[in-house]
């Protein structure tokens, strides 16, 4: 999130409104409907506000 949030002011404003973010492209071959809030196993869920505050990615477990 660090690099992304520093590129565009609009991005920082959007991230400020988010609690979590699903990161990663949906991949049909990794599709798993049992995963919570995401569609494929390559995706991860990031706690946005905590990540911004710490300056590093904080995964949502």
Image (tube, rainbow, N blue to C red):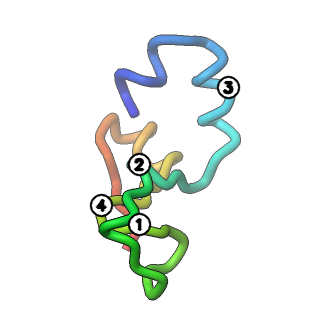
- For this orientation, the residue located farthest to the front is 29
Which label's residue is closer to the chain start, 1 or 3? 3
Residue 38, percent from left and from top: 49, 68
- What residue would you read off at disc 3? 13
Judging from the image, what secondary structure is the residue with disc 3 in?
A: helix
Which label's residue is closer to the chain start, 2 or 3? 3
Residue 58, percent from left and from top: 34, 54
- Image disc number at residue 42: 4
Judging from the image, what secondary structure is the residue with disc 2 in?
A: loop
Q: Distance from label 2 to label 3 (Cα)? A: 22 Å
Judging from the image, what secondary structure is the residue with disc 1 in?
A: loop
CB-based contact (under 8 Å), mark 2 and mark 4: yes
Residue 29, percent from left and from top: 31, 67
Q: Is 15 on the left or on the right of 3, as rendered?
A: right
Q: Is residue 2 above or below residue 34?
A: above
Q: Distance from label 4 to label 1 (Cα)? A: 14 Å
Residue 47, percent from left and from top: 46, 55
């Amino acid at each position: 999130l660090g690099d992304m949030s520093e590129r565009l002011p609009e991005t920082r404003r959007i991230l400020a409104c988010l609690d979590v973010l699903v990161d990663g492209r949906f991949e049909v071959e990794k599709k798993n409907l049992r995963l919570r809030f995401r569609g494929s196993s390559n995706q991860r869920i990031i706690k946005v506000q905590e990540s911004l505050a710490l300056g590093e990615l904080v995964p949502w477990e």
